[in-house]
Structure formats: C-alpha cells, structure tokens
Image (cartoon, rainbow, N blue to C red):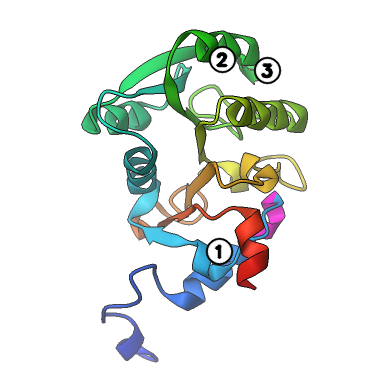
Amino acid sequence: MRQQAELSLPYCDIKGTLALREQIVELATYSGCVLHPDDLVITSGCQEALSVCLRAVTEPSDIVAVESPSFYGSMQAIKAANLKAIEIPTNSENGLSLEALELALEQWPIKAILVTPTVNNPMGYSMSVADKKRLYQLAQSYDISIIEDDIYGDISYQSPRPKTIKSFDEDGRVLLCSSFSKSVAPGIRVGWIAPVPLSRQSDSH
C-alpha cells in the first residue's frame, strides 16, 4: 500500500488485474492446464465462481448432478439458481461413482455435473487420472458441462499435485473454479473461473 497505493484501490479490468491473471495462469500449469490470462475471470471467492458457472450453463429448473455427500455451499448455489440436484453416490477411496453417474445420465436430462474431484470436501478423496478422463468422456458423450471445483487442489499431499479435469478439456465443456481461500487466506476472497477451451487457447496466443 505504501509503495504502490495507486494500484491498490482503483477499478481494474472487468476480468481482473492482468498481473494477477498472469500469476494464476502460471499456477495452473502445475495442474496440467495450459491457459492464457484472457481465459480467466476473477471472482469474489470460489463460491461466486460456482454460482456464475451454474447460471452460465443452465436454466431455472434444470437438473445438476452432484456428489453425495456434497459441499453445503454447492447446494446453496444450486438452490439460489432455482436448479434441481440429483445426488450421485461416492466413496472415500475412488470418489464419484461413474457407473451411477452414467445410469443417471441415461435416465434424466442432466445439464451439468458439479464435482470436487481433487481433495474432495467433505470426503477427502482425489479421483484417479483415469477416472477423471472417464468422467470427461461421459460429459462429452452426453454433451453436458462439468463445473470443476478445484479449491483444494493446491493443498494436496501428492507431488506433483493432481491434474484437473480441465487439463483434458478439448471442447470447452469444463469450467474450472478455484480460489486462494484455502491455500493463502480466507479473507482475501479472490477466486477465478477458467472457461475457455484449450482448442481456442492455441488460436488466441
């Protein structure tokens, strides 16, 4: 504040400060993502990011598939957007049951899948790379979006940290949401969305 007060308090780009977006892009490489600063939108924490993404890919009364049990804040966001949730069972080792998800996709007009596949809250699991790829392929097959909550990814005990589903995204159906709330400090309230597909990123560079 003393050294650069003029940079601390004014309005900035609607997407968020470029320097911040550049640092987030660098951070994202550790999860396997190749992003560009223009791909990012800065939000007031991850909760707002989830809410924005839900509204972007659904209409009121649409059905969203969620993990069961699920993060309470996700359920609040779904309720606030007037959406319906269908619960997909999970277990503490492998995470989301892909068999149950596929069965639900066959029977219900699901519009999006909301998941926390890495260091899940509240179960703590991290899905394997193979299962994340299979989840992405299911979303492709049924032409629906994945909203990936990666807020805990950077505090994984694994090294290197696990890849995100977004790192496999070829057609822009994965909306990656994250924040510094768990890795730096909750009061910072800086989150982000990476909504642009890798195929477009190569064109924008």
Q: CA distance from mark 2 to mark 3?
A: 17 Å
Secondary structure, mark 2, is helix
Please tell me the numbered disc located at residue 194: none
Q: Nearer the viewer, mark 2 or mark 3?
A: 2
Q: Return the disc, 2 or 3, that comes first in the chain's sequence.
A: 3
| Magenta segment boundaries in residue numbering | 27-31
Whole-percent x, y for residue 128 in the image: 73, 29
User: In front: 142, or 4?
Assistant: 142
Whole-percent x, y for residue 141 in the image: 62, 26
Within-10-Å neighbours for mark 1: few <14, some 14–19, many 20+: many
Labels in figure, total: 3
Q: Is residue 76 above or below residue 27?
A: above
Within-10-Å neighbours for mark 3: few <14, some 14–19, many 20+: few
Kindly identify the residue that appears in the image at 50 percent across and 77 percent down: 19
Whether 30 is among the magenta residues is yes
Quadrant where the N terminus lies? bottom left
Kindly identify the residue that appears in the image at 40 percent across and 47 percent down: 46
Whether 85 is among the magenta residues is no
Q: Amino acid at mark 1?
A: Ile
Q: Amino acid at mark 2?
A: Leu
Q: Which residue is labeled 3 in the image?
A: 93
Contact (Cβ within 8 Å) of mark 2 with mark 3: no
Q: Is residue 77 above or below residue 1?
A: above
Q: Which residue is labeled 2 in the image?
A: 101
Q: Quadrant of residue 43?
A: bottom left
- Can the viewer see residue 174 in this picture? yes
